[in-house]
Image (cartoon, coloured by chain):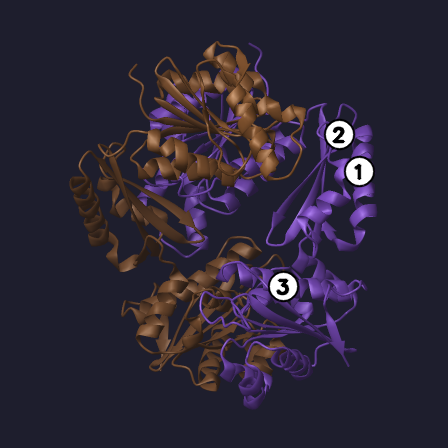
Chain colours: A brown, B purple
Amino acid sequence: MKKNGYTVLSVGDELTLGITTDTNSGYICRQLGEIGGTVKRILTVPDRTEDIVEALRLAARDSAFVVMSGGLGPTEDDRTRYALAEFRGQPLRENAALVAEIQKRFDAMNRPMSESNKIQALLPEQAQALPNSCGTAPGICLEHEGTRVFALPGVPREMKAMLEQSVLPALPRADNFLIMKQLHLVGVGESVIGEAIKPLMKQDANPTVGTTVKDSIITVRLVARGSDKDETQALCDAGEKEVRAALGENIFGQDDDTLPGVVVRLLAEKNATIALAESCTGGMIASLLVNIPGASNVLKNGIVSYANEAKTELLGVPAEVIEEHGAVSKEVAILMARNARERARADYSLAVTGIAGPGGGTKDKPVGTVWLAMATPFGVSYLRRNFLADRQGNRVLSANTGLTLLWRELAGLAPPPETQHER
Amino acid sequence: MKKNGYTVLSVGDELTLGITTDTNSGYICRQLGEIGGTVKRILTVPDRTEDIVEALRLAARDSAFVVMSGGLGPTEDDRTRYALAEFRGQPLRENAALVAEIQKRFDAMNRPMSESNKIQALLPEQAQALPNSCGTAPGICLEHEGTRVFALPGVPREMKAMLEQSVLPALPRADNFLIMKQLHLVGVGESVIGEAIKPLMKQDANPTVGTTVKDSIITVRLVARGSDKDETQALCDAGEKEVRAALGENIFGQDDDTLPGVVVRLLAEKNATIALAESCTGGMIASLLVNIPGASNVLKNGIVSYANEAKTELLGVPAEVIEEHGAVSKEVAILMARNARERARADYSLAVTGIAGPGGGTKDKPVGTVWLAMATPFGVSYLRRNFLADRQGNRVLSANTGLTLLWRELAGLAPPPETQHER
């Protein structure tokens, strides 16, 4: 089998115990992707020599490169160097230059070097040390049967520096470009999207097209690969054009765009302001908007009226209306929106009232029932949704639905399905 | 080879491209650890049928169980069900009961079911569907040559519910116990904690003790292991006692406790209410509290007064005070707190005003400068902090500092360092 591509290997009990989230692997994958590398798999194994050796053998069956992290420290549970020696079939030898190197680092820190730190100067014969510019553990590089292995420390800062300084420059690139584009959609189901762009989503297409969902935001991701940069970019652009043709109406942004970011930008472009009245979302929408630099220019204020009393006192929703229709009702949502807008003298307002759960549901208004209303200079648009998630999930979905209502209005698009309107 | 232990398998291009950090695998590992399971490896592969099949075969060589997530959606790039069919050597068949089930869910959401959602009703022959209580994609369970595979959706919320409801109850409990205890601290540095419990942090101790930090919340984690459940529990308890003896004053909770959860609980126990006045945090504190079931009993209201106008109109902070001292000042924070409490007729209030960045900093008040004030029946406590994170980080740190101020007051503990007080 011709070897190609990468296996990324992470070592550590804390990872397979699920105590620490592995962010090293993702970082390494991203860096490899940027130089056009294809990651075949990520493997994560505990701090056991035999598990690491098995993982190396598995990776070496088909991968031209293995980039691994973790297990290079000076303590008993750091097994990577022993595993590398066994994998390579060579004994470990103390490298005198490395001992001196490590000694120098401890001198610089004014700390005594302990005997156990010498373990970090042990290398398999014919392996090379990779210098560590921000820690004591050197990395190790060796080649075995056509597979080149780079072993980096597990401490993210040290791993990143060594990857950048010693690994990436040694890897092949340029004749294999990877160009990525992400388009973000909201207000439409993943299956509808899948149907619309099915022809693009074939397994071996170029660009490959995939979708991911998070909190009702769907991201369509195009990844084009090729040996010529311009051609690869053109492939990616062509794919993007097709996706936009099929789904343009639901695309609110691309790459680093976020839904609150787009809403703040559109409001700023219109020189318009907004006020918020939040019950079940309880400040979440305000917080999402405030997280965008420049929100101060568009956000007049936000009222968290989770209690009925607050709806009456701060938003002027008559107690009788709440009594008659319930706090989670079209009538209350509309009044919250109208009054929030008027009282703040804002151009727009958004109001949310719902039953986030776990308690509070009834037969007519089960947990997840949410009414949203948006007041504009031209009246009020409102809609009902029935979410099926847990408390936090229902709140996030409510916030995103509210932001969608705003985004579509500000962008001059048709309102979301089932939106009603009154002057 | 006798099969035993677990392989955890994650599927998704977004993972091997490094776009999304895989949190599912760690969560699954933790849950498996809690029932005494040993995770041999975590494998992560792209959305390609052949890669998934290869991973399943590899796992099936030595693992008694495979718990996988991802690739069960209704779109063309969701390959898990095809891979399972190939791995099992059985064709996919549409399961009529599942179609009805999925149809029911769409009906409940008042949304049309698209043709492609029927893909989610395709199962390999002799496989069982795992019900999905919070999404449309059912899971799949099948057995092949002594290895049992559980395939769960990639959406974390759905994965977690299915793991808890359908997978964990079906797994064997080992006679190898792992008992974990987490203690959560706030308001003290990690190095101080490390120093205080250094004797407990030896490599081969039982329990092992480690710390992790997230957004200024530090978690001390004790993991005890043993073959006898009671003895293991006793070891864990003894370790916990030592940590509490050293650091008790800063421990706000344990295991699933959260800082907002503890604050809501303490307020509820005192039958007390709170009002919020948030500038730079912009609703984040309100949202954190509202996320706790029962928050309706304690949260009177929240005002997001990000704009100066809102501070004046909704909180009665005179424009001249803002003019004289600046919006980010002790004086404004104190007035925000006093007035929020009075106007809401609440027992407590919390006010935050700060410069989250990236712009807006000056020499005297650099980005990250935050004033917090808490009004109580006995006066106002206030403090200044200078955070060094990015916009979102500074806002989260501000929110946690405010909640810490509240927690210590409600728990009858000394206020955080450098807190001042006036009647």
In 3D space, how far apart are the residues under numbered discs 2 and 3 (Cα atoms)?
38 Å
In 3D space, how far apart are the residues under numbered discs 1 and 2 (Cα atoms)?
10 Å
In 3D space, how far apart are the residues under numbered discs 3 and 1 (Cα atoms)?
31 Å
Q: Looking at the image, is B60 positioned above or below residue B378? A: above
Q: Amino acid at mark 3?
A: Leu
Give the class, few, some or many, for how many residues have Cα within 10 Å of label 2's Cα (few <14, many ≥20): few
Q: Residue at x 23, y 41 (%)?
A: A200
Q: Which element type, helix, strand or loop, lies under badge 2? A: loop
Q: Is residue A129 visible?
A: yes
A189 vs A240, left or right, is: right
Give the class, few, some or many, for how many residues have Cα within 10 Å of label 1's Cα (few <14, many ≥20): many
Q: Quadrant of the C terminus of chain A?
A: bottom left
Q: Tell which subunit mark 1 falls on.
A: B
Q: Looking at the image, is A167 positioned above or below residue B56? A: below
Q: Which element type, helix, strand or loop, lies under badge 1? A: helix
Q: Name the residue tied to disc 3.
A: B289
Q: Name the residue tied to disc 1.
A: B239
* Tag 1 near tag 2, CB within 8 Å: yes
A341 vs A197, left or right, is: right
Q: Give A406 or A132, whichever is nearer the viewer.
A: A132
Q: Name the residue tied to disc 2.
A: B205
* Tag 2 near tag 3, CB within 8 Å: no
